[in-house]
Amino acid sequence: MGDKHLFKKKKNETPDTITPDSNVDTRPDTAVQGQNEPEQIEPEQKEFVYGMDQTEQGSEDVQSGTSDADGSAPSQETNENIIECDSLVKIYKTDDVEVMALQGLELNIKYGELMAVIGKSGSGKSTLLNMIGGLERPTAGKLYVDGKDLFAMTDKELVEYRKHTVGFVWQKNSRNLLPYMTAIENVQVPMYFDKSNKEDKYARAHDLLCRVGLEDKINSYPSQMSGGEQQRVAIAIALANNPKILLADEPTGAVDTKTSNMIQDLFRKLNEELGITIIIVTHDISLANKVGRVVMIADGKISTEKIMKESYKDRMNELSTDGFSSDDSHEEYSILDKANRVQISPDILAAAGIDSNKVKVQVVDGKVIITKE
Ligand SMILES: Nc1ncnc2c1ncn2[C@@H]1O[C@H](COP(=O)(O)OP(=O)(O)OP(=O)(O)O)[C@@H](O)[C@H]1O
């Protein structure tokens, strides 16, 4: 990512909150990872490990795009970033209309990060998540995930990628769970093509359900579980194939505050225990305040990012969620794009009394000062 640290925004300033448009679901109708994937694949031997510790599995993954040969694709050995978005553009075309959902987005995400993506409705959050998840193809730019070039993958390779590299959790449980299966059966669905025997699959599903705190509900059907419990089953399902990245789109959007807190804690626990990279698209400010980094998308680009202060990281490890106050937990930065441009939010412009499109830019004592003309 380009240089950052232009100026600090007021602490505690919350991003714009919005109501998700629940009537319109523009995403591809892909349910639980692995369920709607008709292609037959060669089963592969996998160890019973989660998260980062999958170098063996990764090497058997799709090879297209792992272009060490041309030297351009990052790999885990040489790169600390699991995701690199470089000038990423996504244009949707419907009839005569073109929508530019992402407009040259730059973003790097490190292995093992726990981060949130926020922004107004229509800013491109889900589009970014869907592209990282291999559900949408970039129109232009570069997108590398775990050393693989998603731009260059064939459809078949993308199916493989979706099965092994990423796991999804959606807001709507109907998209995550099959109603006629118990929790433990649901978790085993994505393991269908896995070569390991029935007992191993059962044991792995059982272990995952224990990790998400549902050891008492393994034989319950979705209708017999609360919304929060169903969401925890959904997280176990998303982890079923030991993905390196967990992608969650509004995972707390349909639950109450208490359940939301529980899910937030669970993401942190899984991130710490499994070392898995977790990216959460959310409007839930309390959730955004409890992750290591929050990036805000505005008009299809990253505009600001907030990094959790070290002192808060320590406190988060000591305190339960209920006792945690998120005030002043992060420092906020604006992001320079490749052309050294920066977006300044309307709030900051208003606070500085800037109401025209012409400003004075000076360097004073090593600081860039932007003032009204
Ligand atoms: N399949 C699609 N076809 C056409 N336009 C689309 C499609 N998916 C998204 N868009 C448009 O792309 C833009 C970004 O959409 P996206 O869903 O990524 O935004 P978002 O930030 O996730 O919004 P929300 O918070 O409301 O879910 C919007 O203008 C949206 O209407």
Image: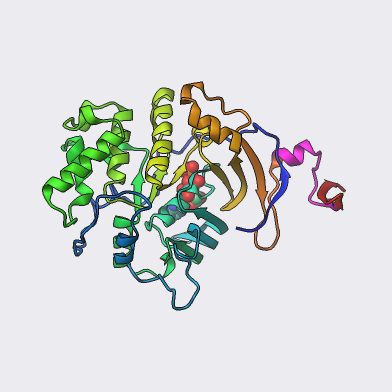
Q: Position of residue 233 (x, y in %)?
A: 28, 36
Is 225 above or below relative to 190?
above
Give the extent of the magenta segment. 347-362
Q: How is the image coloured?
A: rainbow
How many numbered tags mark residues here?
0
Residue positioned most to the left: 198
Residue positioned most to the bottom: 69
Which image quarter holds the N terminus?
Answer: bottom right
Is 232 above or below relative to 53?
above
Q: Is residue 360 magenta?
A: yes
* In the foreground, 247 or 71: 71
Q: Position of residue 268 (x, y in %)?
A: 43, 37
Instruction: Say which quarter of the image contains residue 149.
Output: bottom left
Q: Residue at x 25, y 36 (%)?
A: 209
Q: Is residue 217 magenta?
A: no
* In the foreground, 57 or 70: 57
Asked if residue 22 can be seen in this view, the reply is no
Q: Residue at x 42, y 61 (%)?
A: 146
Q: Residue at x 39, y 34 (%)?
A: 266
Is 257 above or below relative to 50?
above
Q: Residue at x 44, y 62 (%)?
A: 76
Instruction: Say which quarter of the image contains residue 153.
Output: bottom left
Left or right placement of residue 4 versus residue 92 in this view: right
Q: Position of residue 113 (x, y in %)?
A: 48, 47
Asked if residue 165 can be seen in this view, the reply is yes
Is 203 above or below relative to 130?
above
